Image (tube, rainbow, N blue to C red):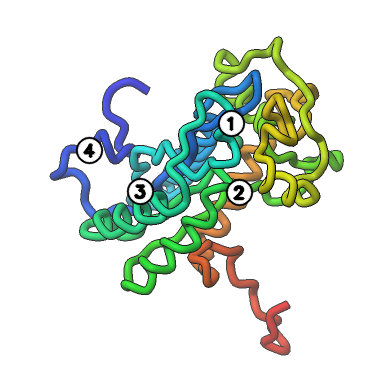
Amino acid sequence: MTGRDPLRLADRPWPDVGRPVVLVPLGSTEQHGPHLPLDTDIAVASVVCDALAARLAADGIDAVVAPPIAYGASGEHEDFPGTISIGTQALTFLIVELGRSASAWADRIVFVNGHGGNVEALATAVPVLIDEERNAAWVPCVPGAETLPGGVPVDAHAGRSETSILLALDPGRVHTDGFEAGNVTPVRELMGDLRERGVRGVAPNGVLGDATPATAGEGRTLLESIVGEAWSRLHGGRTDEHGCLVAGPEAPDPVTGAVS
Ligand SMILES: [Zn+2]
């Protein structure tokens, strides 16, 4: 889009800001294999924010997307050139202070997280904001199911899933001749090794998964699923003890009143 976009906070002069819901994309600047850009997580969080802001606007709720937080906690990727990590502690302070500042005028602040390494900071910072009676929450960019249609598992880092999403968003930013498999062991099983040796120790090319089968079509399906999941959590409005939005309350059984 050229010209002023009313759904972008940065595009609003102050008298036009009002009291919107503020969506803050939270990403990372970190290696994403030999084929994806360093800002992959920012790109994903930003596009999810754009979609959520458009849905809120369609419901008559004023919403804006703030400039993204481009740096996160990426220590496990620091062995790769290009990665810039500010670590969990600095990120925690950043989220708290950003939330406090924006609360002066925002109706609600929702951090939309594109990088798993940021979860610890969010889970510490957002409950602080909530304790201070600020209307804050966070939501991860995760699909509604752990598998894609056809039973294909969603993989962790720079593999089939993220590569597909980037192909859907902007194929010109993907090195299509560089698709490689990395370490395909599920991340849950890799965790101990990952903590000890970093990503480079378990996957020299930086890929956790296999990028080779990625397609733009699969990326569009995944994005739809991620936006749908985030939307249902945002709409439900309920947070857990970590300040994370969870799926909305289920309708009580009309006979027993019980929630299944
Ligand atoms: Zn990523």
Q: Residue at x 81, y 35 (%)?
A: 184
Q: Amino acid at mark 4?
A: Arg
Q: Tell me where residue 126 appears, x and y as whole percent.
A: 42, 62
Above or below, comparing residue 133 to residue 48 in the picture:
below
Mark 3 Cα-neighbour bin, 10 Å: few <14, some 14–19, many ≥20: many
- Quadrant placement of the N terminus: top left
Q: Relative to residue 39, is residue 96 depicted above or below?
A: below
Question: Circle 1 — which element?
Answer: loop
The kind of residue on which mark 3 rests is: Ala
| Mark 4 close to ligand 1, CB under 8 Å | no
Which of the two discs, 3 and 1, labels the residue nearer the N terminus?
Answer: 3
Residue occupying the point 52% across, 54% down: 139
Q: Nearer the viewer, residue 72 or 165?
A: 72
Q: Residue at x 38, y 68 (%)?
A: 128
Residue designated by label 1: 79
Q: Nearer the viewer, mark 3 or mark 1?
A: 1
The earlier-in-sequence mark between 1 and 2 is: 1
According to the image, label 4 marks what residue? Answer: 12
> Dot 2 surroundings within 10 Å: few (below 14), some, or many (20 or more)?
some
Spatial distance from mark 1 to mark 2, Cα to Cα?
A: 35 Å
Q: Which residue is mark 3?
A: 63
Q: Earlier in the sequence, mark 2 or mark 3?
A: 3
